[in-house]
């Protein structure tokens, strides 16, 4: 069985010196590089300078070593927060196990180049939709607690707190003091943003600082900070600098305030103005209500003055009189008609009585009828031939009837004459 390759098994490990030597040789093969970053720390020694070069977008740092003369003769005065470009060679120190950049040349990032980078970042964020107005969240009318990120004991903090409390005395603040200039600005502001955004009592977050040149406001053009603002679920107000200043975070924030004072006016209402508005609304509401009551009262008065409501039974009474008159006329007409018909019936009865047989019988006449038998039915005698001898007769007179037997016809009573 052959031994395992060195460093590939626990039975045949590499010593630390072997690993460090190999790492140093590998890094040495990388050659020289150009590196851009922000100076986070600067420590000058008699002959050498130690610099901590930081990448603000990724929160990573790199140790830099260079001659002191190189720092003193740099094209710009080097200090913490300055953006620079360095040329050097990476070196790994096996004794300490550390990596550093041995710098031989330092260049400042020109304003034109810086502005060009800012413009490229602006176009990138705009293309991703971070500036879209539809994504802007509205500010609450009256926030419970205002989160304020600003410099310690700064004029911006004093302006925001003083103006906001003068407008709405009950407003509460959750203040986070951070660096607002230099290499530590972005990580501290991002940490404060995350902390305030996670607080359920904070309804709006304000990032405020005073004005300055582009170098002083450079952290607020940082991509990491802009993306962190876009990720917040709490509305964010950007109040960086003065009116002409327009850092990138202004475009990403939900509201841009021209100054910290303007931000204080935007986040809370003016109690005096609101009370005046409430009083005005109360007056207008009362006036509108009184006018409505007066209109309705006038309308009711008009309705009550109408004849149908002023004397609701008048129409019924008028109709009742008409009904009474119609009934009287109908009764009168019926009485007249009955009287006329009664007279007519009386006249007809008199005529009938006059023409009827009863009246004739009363004057002494009689009606002679044959009594009915098996051979014929009874009939009124009209000739003597109708009453032969032996025929039974019924003689009706005025007060009754009698029966008789016929002896036959007599001689002509008119022959003797």
Image (spheres, rainbow, N blue to C red):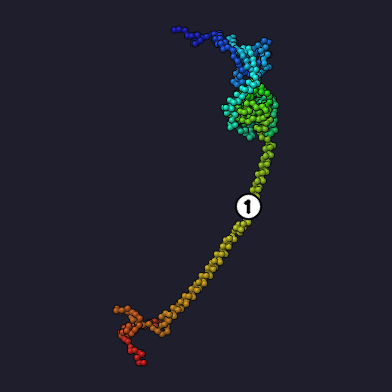
Question: Residue at 53% of width from left, 70% of height from top?
Answer: 332
Q: Where is residue 15 in the image (x, y as percent from the top left)?
A: 54, 8
Task: Tell me where residue 360 sits by quadrant.
Answer: bottom left
Q: In this view, does 201 lie above or below 406?
A: above
Is residue 232 among the parts visible in the rendering?
Answer: no
* Residue drawn 54% across the image and 8% down it: 18
Give the residue at x 66% y 22%.
Answer: 215
- Of all residues, the one furthest to the bottom in this rendering is 417
In the picture, measured across the screen, residue 83 lies left or right of residue 12, that is right
Q: Which of 43 and 312 is in front in this view?
A: 43
Viewer-proximal residue among 387 and 246: 246
In the image as oriented, which residue stretches furthest toward the top? 2
Query: Can I make out residue 416 in this image?
Result: yes
SS at badge 1 = helix
The count of marks equals: 1
Residue 197: name its quadrant: top right
Q: Position of residue 297 (x, y in %)?
A: 64, 51
**Looking at this view, is 222 or 314 the one in front?**
222
Where does residue 272 sit, x and y in percent of width and height? 69, 37
**On the image, numbered disc 1 is attached to which residue?**
299
Q: How many neighbours does mark 1 have within 10 angstroms: few (below 14), some (14-19), or many (20 or more)?
A: few
Image quarter where the C terminus lies is: bottom left
């Amino acid at each position: 069985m052959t031994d395992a390759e060195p460093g590939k098994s626990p039975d045949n490990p590499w010593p630390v010196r072997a690993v460090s030597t190999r790492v140093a040789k590998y890094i040495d093969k990388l050659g020289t590089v150009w590196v851009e970053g922000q100076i986070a720390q600067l420590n000058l020694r008699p002959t050498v300078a130690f610099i901590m070069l930081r990448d603000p977008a990724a929160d990573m740092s790199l140790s830099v070593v260079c001659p002191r003369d190189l720092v003193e003769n740099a094209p710009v005065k080097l200090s913490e927060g300055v953006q620079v470009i360095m040329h050097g060679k990476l070196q790994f120190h096996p004794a300490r196990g550390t990596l550093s950049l041995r710098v031989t040349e330092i260049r400042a990032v020109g304003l034109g180049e810086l502005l060009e980078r800012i413009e490229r970042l602006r176009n990138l964020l705009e293309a991703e939709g971070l500036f879209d107005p539809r994504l802007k969240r509205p500010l609450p009318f009256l926030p419970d607690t205002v989160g304020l990120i600003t410099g310690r004991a700064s004029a911006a903090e004093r302006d925001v707190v003083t103006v906001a409390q003068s407008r709405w005395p009950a407003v509460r603040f959750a203040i986070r003091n951070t660096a607002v200039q230099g290499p530590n600005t972005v990580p501290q502001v991002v940490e404060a943003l995350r902390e305030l955004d996670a607080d359920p009592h904070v309804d709006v977050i304000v990032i405020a600082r005073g004005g300055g040149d582009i170098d002083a406001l450079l952290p607020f053009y940082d991509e990491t900070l802009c993306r962190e603002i876009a990720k917040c679920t709490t509305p964010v107000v950007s109040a960086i600098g003065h009116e002409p200043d327009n850092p990138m975070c202004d475009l990403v924030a939900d509201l841009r305030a021209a100054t910290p004072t303007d931000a204080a006016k935007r986040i809370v209402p003016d109690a005096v103005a609101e009370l005046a508005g409430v009083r005005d609304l109360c007056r207008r509401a009362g006036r509108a209500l009184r006018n409505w009551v007066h209109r309705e009262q006038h309308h009711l008065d008009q309705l009550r003055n109408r004849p149908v409501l002023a004397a609701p039974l008048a129409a019924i009474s008028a109709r009742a009189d008409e009904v009474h008159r119609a009934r009287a006329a109908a009764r009168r007409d019926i009485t007249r008609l009955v009287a006329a018909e009664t007279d007519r019936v009386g006249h007809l009865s008199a005529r009938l009585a006059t023409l009827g047989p009863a009246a004739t019988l009363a004057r002494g006449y009689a009606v002679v009828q044959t009594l009915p038998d098996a051979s014929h039915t009874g009939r009124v005698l009209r000739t003597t031939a109708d009453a032969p001898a032996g025929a039974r007769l019924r003689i009706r007179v005025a007060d009754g009837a009698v029966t008789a037997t016929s002896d036959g016809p007599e001689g002509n009573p008119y022959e003797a004459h």
